[in-house]
Amino acid sequence: MRSSIFLPVLSLALGCSAAPHESHQSIARQASTGNASIPGITPNQAPAVPPNQNDCHFQYYTQAIDHFGQHNGTFQQKYNIITDYFKPGGPIFFYQGEEQIYLDCVDTSIAVSWAQQTNGIAVVLEHRYFGESAPFGATDPTKQFEEYSYLTLDNVMADGVAFLDYLKKNVTGATDSKVIVFSGSYGGFLSTVYRQNHPEAIWGAIASAPPANAITNNSKAQDYYNWNIWLNNVYQDRSAEASSKIKNAVSVLEQRITSGTDLTSLKSELGLCNVPTTTDFPLIQVWIQNILNYAAEFNYATLRPGRASAALPLEVVVNITQTQTDPIQILNETLWMWFEPLGYYPCIDYKTNNALWPSVALIQQGVFQLVTCKYFPESSISDWPHGTIFGPAANPGAIYESSCDALLNVSTPTMAELQTKYKYTPEDLQNSTRIIWSLGQYDPTSAVSPNQPGINAPIMTTDRNVSRILYTSNMAHREDLFAPDPSDRDTVIQARAIELESIKGWLGWYDL
Ligand SMILES: *[C@@H]1O[C@H](CO)[C@@H](O)[C@H](O)[C@H]1NC(C)=O
Ligand SMILES: *[C@@H]1O[C@H](CO)[C@@H](O)[C@H](O)[C@H]1NC(C)=O
Ligand SMILES: *[C@@H]1O[C@H](CO)[C@@H](O)[C@H](O)[C@H]1NC(C)=O
Ligand SMILES: *[C@@H]1O[C@H](CO)[C@@H](O)[C@H](O)[C@H]1NC(C)=O
Ligand SMILES: *[C@@H]1O[C@H](CO)[C@@H](O)[C@H](O)[C@H]1NC(C)=O
Ligand SMILES: *[C@@H]1O[C@H](CO)[C@@H](O)[C@H](O)[C@H]1NC(C)=O
Ligand SMILES: *[C@@H]1O[C@H](CO)[C@@H](O)[C@H](O)[C@H]1NC(C)=O
Ligand SMILES: *[C@@H]1O[C@H](CO)[C@@H](O)[C@H](O)[C@H]1NC(C)=O
Ligand SMILES: *[C@@H]1O[C@H](CO)[C@@H](O)[C@H](O)[C@H]1NC(C)=O
């Protein structure tokens, strides 16, 4: 029965709420407004209004489908660049596109502010196979195995390197410009491996929320902090009382379901699509855990559509625990706080595979799933120990690789193979230079990022070029990478300032 939905959503960037499934059934459903297709399931289907040419000027770079001689074709890779502030020799702030349905304008990122302050270039390049930048116009990784065979980590990095080479030639005065790559979440992982594997092209990296320490197919690997322990502590730290009420509510729900008490009524109390059976608790629990996860991970100071359903969602959850006395209603309101604004969840369809996928609508889940199967396995994030507020451990088990094999015809390398090949073993990271791993308090990704000096990150020295961890209180998932906004918390503003001053040091601006 608990056949499927067990990986938590590691989100914008790791939006992995579910492993791929053997059945891979369609989850298109009738929404109240008609048959809305579900973003993230229908490839390239945008949930919110994507940017257009009035928001910013998108351009296309003719990119090689394969950088290693296996195919001679090309595809059009989308980018957006701002050179207004550039003076010869200034840095290039290279925003590596994330696993999104569409490409953001670069002015929605911190790059423009940094470019203004350093006479630099701000540029974002869409990730291959995401959004419009799909070789062969490929749309279905579960069928088009040949088309998707060029989705490799080596090709992703080579795209960036080729594009940057072109930019340096094309933009007058940029020949000797130094490149600072930045991106968040999966993109933070990419930023780390860019710097480690292409130091000739990449001078430094700001890797925000980079899960570079959980790239494993072993859901029980314990040589790092644990995603769900971190998440549990986020709630405990925010409100001991709310945490206790949530824990109690989950326990009440478990009792209610396993004892078969008034299950017909429970369907409407929680807005479920069907009347649960006495064995359904783990499936429903996963939905609750995912929403509590999002509320913490995406606890942004302002509403960010596609990523979160509310501004300050963690505070919304805490408020719910304070205004609701009925434990089941605490869970109901928490769930619907997320789903209702999305508009395409008529009810909670907890039995359908991958039905949680569109709940973080910006993520192009189908293609991202392939990425996680091929070179970014994140099974470890689904480990769920006993003792959290999310209730009894719903251990995901090792369904991950078999799903990858069955559905996507790929076998997943081991953590050791990937770390060695792409130079991010703990020892490699300890020896690394000019990477900042930026971690936020609310973000469970912090638990699976380089986060322990002397273990998976360098011990601090007086050498400012040595890589380091930057931990920021009151910050959500990769929040430092957004463009400045009036809602910004002081700590996030400060994190960006620290990053910029570090970059100036890396560039040697004030060398004596
Ligand atoms: C929605 O889909 C159902 C089943 O495919 C179909 O019968 C119905 O006509 C569709 N409704 C609209 C408004 O498209
Ligand atoms: C690519 O083009 C070169 C030169 O025409 C040719 O020799 C090679 O076989 C082609 N490679 C592939 C994979 O088609
Ligand atoms: C490259 O040069 C062409 C021709 O001058 C120009 O249209 C294009 O915008 C340039 N690309 C970038 C990234 O500046
Ligand atoms: C991880 O991958 C290795 C090599 O493919 C395999 O031997 C091992 O069983 C896998 N571990 C899990 C937990 O699936
Ligand atoms: C569950 O929560 C939603 C959203 O807050 C609300 O509209 C609905 O009435 C609640 N269900 C019940 C049975 O109270
Ligand atoms: C939470 O409740 C407090 C007190 O009622 C209110 O001031 C605050 O705006 C609420 N926060 C959110 C995010 O709804
Ligand atoms: C699956 O991948 C293998 C190589 O890894 C290939 O030989 C085989 O043809 C693929 N299967 C399909 C159905 O494409
Ligand atoms: C890390 O640096 C030490 C000291 O320079 C060196 O002995 C070791 O081989 C390096 N390890 C890696 C993985 O580069
Ligand atoms: C970082 O390294 C660069 C290049 O070697 C050097 O110019 C710069 O002074 C170093 N920065 C600091 C703060 O030591």
Image (spheres, rainbow, N blue to C red):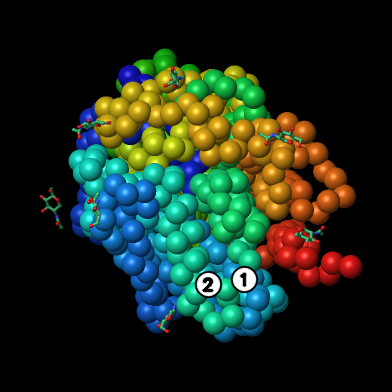
Residue 494 is situated, as x and y percent measured from the top left of the image, at: 76, 62
Residue 105 is situated, as x and y percent measured from the top left of the image, at: 47, 71
Look at mark 2 in the image and give the residue it sits on: 168
Relative to residue 177, is residue 401 depicted above or below? above
Look at 29% across and 47% down and name the residue there.
70
Look at mark 1 in the image and give the residue it sits on: 177
Which amino acid, by three-letter code, is at mark 2?
A: Lys
Give residue 72's quadrant in the image.
bottom left
Relative to residue 471, is residue 423 depicted above or below? above
Give residue 56's quadrant in the image.
bottom left
Please state which of residues 474 and 180 is positioned toward the viewer in this rendering: 180
Q: Secondary structure at mark 2?
A: helix
Q: Quadrant of the C terminus?
A: bottom right
Disc 2 and disc 1 in contact, CB within 8 angstroms? yes
Q: Quadrant of ligand 9?
A: bottom right
Q: Residues within 10 Å of mark 1 (few under 14, many from 20)?
A: many
Q: Residues within 10 Å of mark 2 (few under 14, many from 20)?
A: some
